[in-house]
Structures are given as C-alpha cells and as structure tokens.
Image: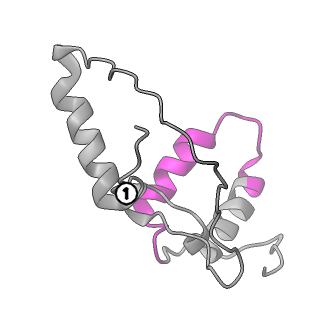
Amino acid sequence: MPPLDPNPPPFQPSGCFTEERHQQFLKDHDTGFLTPAELNVLSDMLSKQNRAFAWDDTERGSFRTDFFLPVVIPTIPHVPWTEHNRPIPPGLEVEVCQIIRNKVKAGVYEPSNSAYR
C-alpha cells in the first residue's frame, strides 16, 4: 500500500474513482468532522486505491482463490426442511424483481440447485 501523502496534489480522476464520485464523496463526508486538508488526503488515497472499492454491484469482485480458498460448509445427510416463500407485497414486486435481476447480473447472486432457498 503506498504511503499517504500529507500534501497531496489536486484531485485527478483515476479508474473507478471518477470526478462525479469524488464530488459525491465530498458531499457525503463534508460534515465538519474532517478538515479540508484531511479530506484531500483521503481523496488522494481513494484515488490511488480505487480498485479496492466497489462503488456499485457491477464493480464488485471476488477474492483471489490463490490467496483465499473457497469456503466449503460441511453437512451431514439429512432431509431438508420446507418453508413457504414469503410473499412480496404487490406494490413492491416490480422493484424487488429489478433488484434481484441486477444482483444476478452483477454476480452477487448465483444460480443454485440447493434444496434450501
């Protein structure tokens, strides 16, 4: 990880950390808790490390399997229980279905043949 520069240069968009996201970041974090100089240092760090952050689900990634092995959950033979799905309120159905489609498209949700839902 590169060291923090206490006197960073003016903001330069890089990768996923665009000017639009920078402006939103400043708007969201300009609460008075951090000084303008501290916000500049933080913006510089975010710009240099922009690939470490997912700004939305489409930019989400996974850990490298050579560093982190996939998780295997051991189970014993059993009969899966059955529960009914909870209904989606009709007024929210379109919105909920769109959220689920976006999650599937981004790879957050993946197909499964599991007996559990």
Q: Amino acid at mark 1?
A: Glu
Residue 29 located left or right of residue 80: right
Query: Looking at the picture, does residue 105 appear above or below residue 45?
Result: above
Q: Residue at x 48, y 73 (%)?
A: 13
Give the x, y percent position of residue 19. 43, 64
Identify the element where label 1 is drawn: loop
Give the x, y percent position of residue 86. 33, 18
Q: Is the C terminus in the top left, top right, bottom left or bottom right quadrant?
A: top left
Q: Residue at x 76, y 57 (%)?
A: 37
Magenta residues span 15-38
| Residue beneath disc 1 | 110
- Between 16 and 100, the one nearer to me in the picture: 100
Q: Quick check: can you spot residue 10? A: no
Residue 107 located left or right of residue 89: right
Give the x, y percent position of residue 10. 61, 72
- Between 73 and 55, the one nearer to me in the picture: 73
Q: Quick check: can you spot residue 67? A: yes
Residue 103 located left or right of residue 67: left
Q: Residue furthest bottom?
A: 66
Give the x, y percent position of residue 91. 17, 15
What's the coloring here?
Answer: one colour
Q: Residue at x 16, y 15 (%)?
A: 90
**Magenta stretch encompasses residue 16:** yes
Query: Looking at the picture, does residue 7 appear above or below residue 97?
Result: below
